Amino acid sequence: MTSLTENVPNEPGSWDEDWSFAYLEKLYAALHARFRLARLGEAEEVIADASRMSAFVRHDVDVSLRIAGELARREAGWSVKSTYHVMIDSPFYDLRSDESAALLNDMQALGHEVGLHYDIVARGMRDADRATREDDIARACTTLERIMGAPVRSVSFHLPVQDLLRGPLRVAGRVSGYAEDLFRWYVSDSRARWREGEPIASLDRPRSHVLQILVHPVWWGDESVRPELRLRSIVQGLAAERKVPYGPLRDRMSDHILYRAADPSP
């Protein structure tokens, strides 16, 4: 099992200097100035209109629905409506709890879209054929629809298999965040690195009339905190809440999100 003891390589052109809500607000202001913002479930109509520059803000909620809920409230204050993809089988939050139900209701009431973050490994579908996997994605969407009482219009994939990368626009009848049309211009903070460089500056280098930008709520907060320190704090809080040892939970989380930054000593 791997842990947070390996270093994330400092890739050429990557950027990780500011993880504060203040910077994120500046990024969203830059998006507003350049793009029409839309939710991922609206992708078919948006992509068809090449006369306008459009952007989708997507969030994969891998670690904490509470943190995602805080970002959803911030975004509403910044006049941003985005798409939150949640896991029905997350090892770190229970989507069926009363707290989760309240958070999902709040997200939708604020105008955000809630879709499915489908975990291919957890569902046992990594080696399944395409038809079997699509059937299971459809079942997972139906489960999420029952939980939140609203239709699921879009999906993203946790550790996607190759045939889903730059694939069709719709998978199991829902918009896929990994569709070819949504990956021509794709900017992401995955593993706490903006690989395209400073994200606001990257907006001046268009590759399509449609931008998809992936922001993971787990990295962001009131202050700019190094991602490894923020993640450590999250794991400590979760370990205390669950009354379980820190080390094994840390290792499980690092494997879940493929994060390899050094874990500072207490």
Image (cartoon, rainbow, N blue to C red):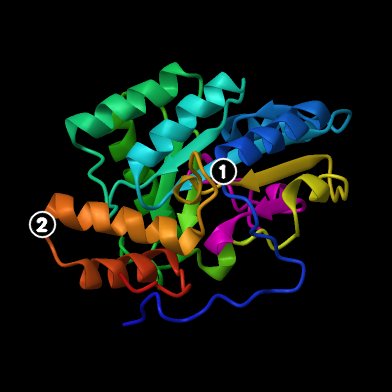
Q: Residue at coordinates 48% horizontally, 45% vertically from top-left?
A: 217
Image depth: mark 2 or mark 1 in front: 1
Confirm whether residue 54 shows in the render: yes
90 w.r.t. 46: above or below: below
**Pointer 2: what residue?**
243
Q: Residue at coordinates 85% horizontally, 51% vertically from top-left?
A: 207
* Residue 189 horizontal/vertical position (percent): 60, 55
Could you tell me which secondary element the residue under label 1 belongs to? loop
10 w.r.t. 40: above or below: below
* Residue 213 horizontal/vertical position (percent): 66, 45
Tag shown at residue 75: none
Q: Residue at coordinates 39% horizontally, 72% vertically from top-left?
A: 264
Quadrant where the N terminus lies? bottom left
Image quarter of residue 192: bottom right
Seen from the viewer's position, the closer of residues 108 and 16 is 16
Amino acid at the residue labelled 2: Lys
Residue 187 drawn in magenta = yes
**Pointer 1: what residue?**
20
Spatial separation of the CA atoms under disc 2 and disc 1: 29 Å
Which range is magenta?
166-192
Residue situated furthest left in the rendering = 243
